Image (tube, grey):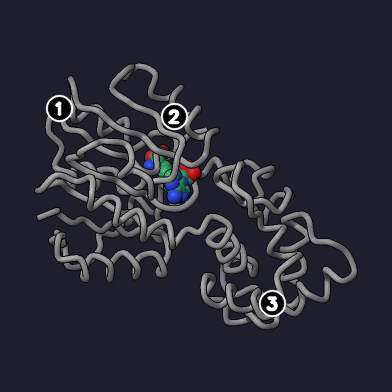
């Protein structure tokens, strides 16, 4: 179970790491980026590794055992990084889900393998995808599919869900994927349910709200001259980060355009295909 860190070389160079640096990794995942950060900041650099997912935090702890006390593990949202009493030289946010989430059908992120319609990163969270799919009005479903999935067939899918759940509660990922496949033709390589699953995941975890609060929190914890590195995986997130950085003059963008992976990385790690890295320096 290995999570290949995306845009690793670019993140490491961008964070301008020095021995002894204090870095907040707000999305620790399996600790792929953090391991590289610890190597570059040896012998005494520290990482505060935050993840909402307790299971990923445990996996990261195993992966990073050899670094001992140089890592502090925090089960929390990165939007609360400003409550930890840390002043950081750098903050990394590598947004979204990890390969572990998609590879574990029981977490409900996969439309290839059947699992409960869950999609929570934090399994203590109150809202699940099943609650939304079975409880929200047709109009509200259509609105989130359009807004958070940018799904052109939002209305038709919302109606199909509404009709299907009158017959039977929708409780599994394959049940939902099949309802969508029955009315939306496959376009290109992507599964017809891709955008719907994205929309549900974003709402279940309030992901865009988290990003906005996380950027604000990063601004508070970074020392002057400290670097913010954000990796996004879809246009909604990237637009949000881009506009936020433009509006907040406390940050100087370090690249006009976001950094994208090269061909070799995309070929060896298809998940990196849609990744974009933005770097900014706190003034
Ligand atoms: C793309 S993965 C990070 C992978 C990591 N950089 C690595 O190299 O292993 C994103 C991680 O962020 C976590 N996550 C998502 N939203 C979060 C939030 N608001 N606060 C904290 N962690 C979050 C997910 O649980 C997931 O483990």
Could you give the CA–CA distance between mark 3 and mark 2, rounded to whole angstroms? Answer: 39 Å
Q: Nearer the viewer, mark 3 or mark 2?
A: 2
Could you give the CA–CA distance between mark 3 and mark 1, rounded to whole angstroms? Answer: 53 Å
Residue drawn at x 25%, y 33% is 37
Closer to the N terminus: mark 3 or mark 1?
1
Q: In the image, is 37 to the left or to the right of 179?
A: left
Q: In the image, is 230 to the left or to the right of 3?
A: left
Could you give the CA–CA distance between mark 1 and mark 2, rounded to whole angstroms? Answer: 21 Å
Residue drawn at x 74%, y 77% is 183
Question: Within the displayed image, which quadrant is ligand 1 positioned in?
Answer: top left
| Image height of 58 relative to 185, above or below | above
Q: Which residue ends up furthest to the right in the rendered image? A: 167
Residue drawn at x 83%, y 71% is 164
Closer to the N terminus: mark 3 or mark 2?
2
Can you tell which quarter of the image residue 8 is in?
top left
Residue indicated by mark 2: 60
The label on residue 184 is 3
Expressed as whole percent of the image width and height from the top left, the position of residue 10 reads 23, 48
Question: Would residue 15 be seen by someone viewing this image from the given angle?
Answer: yes
| Image height of 14 relative to 157, above or below | above
Disc 2: CA contacts within 10 A as few (<14), some (14-19) or many (>=20):
many
CB under 8 Å between discs 3 and 1: no
CB under 8 Å between discs 1 and 2: no
Disc 1: CA contacts within 10 A as few (<14), some (14-19) or many (>=20):
some
The label on residue 20 is 1
Q: What element carries label 1?
A: loop
Q: Nearer the viewer, mark 1 or mark 2?
A: 1
Q: Is mark 2 within 8 Å of ligand 1?
A: yes
């Amino acid at each position: 179970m290995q999570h290949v860190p995306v845009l690793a070389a670019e993140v490491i160079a961008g964070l301008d790491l020095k021995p002894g640096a204090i870095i907040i990794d707000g999305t620790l995942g399996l600790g792929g980026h953090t391991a590289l950060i610890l190597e570059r900041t040896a012998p005494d650099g520290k990482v505060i590794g935050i993840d909402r997912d307790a299971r990923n935090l445990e996996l990261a702890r195993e992966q990073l055992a050899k670094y001992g006390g140089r890592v502090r593990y925090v089960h929390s949202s990165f939007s609360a990084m400003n409550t930890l009493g840390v002043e950081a030289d750098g903050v990394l946010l590598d947004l979204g889900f990890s390969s572990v989430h998609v590879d574990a059908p029981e977490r409900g992120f996969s439309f290839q393998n059947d699992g409960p319609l869950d999609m929570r990163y934090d399994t203590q969270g109150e809202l699940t995808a099943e609650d939304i799919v079975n409880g929200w009005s047709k109009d509200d479903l259509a609105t989130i599919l359009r807004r958070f999935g940018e799904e052109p067939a939002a209305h038709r899918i919302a109606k199909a869900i509404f009709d299907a759940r009158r017959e039977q509660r929708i409780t599994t990922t394959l049940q939902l994927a099949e309802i969508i496949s029955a009315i939306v033709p496959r376009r290109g390589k992507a599964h017809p349910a891709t955008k719907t699953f994205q929309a549900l995941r974003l709402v279940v975890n309030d992901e865009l709200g988290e990003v906005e609060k996380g950027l604000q929190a990063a601004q508070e914890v970074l020392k002057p001259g400290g670097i913010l590195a954000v990796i996004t995986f879809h246009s909604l997130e990237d637009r949000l980060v881009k506009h936020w950085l433009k509006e907040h003059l406390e940050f100087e963008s370090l690249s006009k355009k976001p950094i994208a992976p090269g061909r070799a990385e995309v070929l060896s790690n298809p998940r990196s295909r849609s990744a974009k890295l933005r770097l900014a320096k706190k003034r």
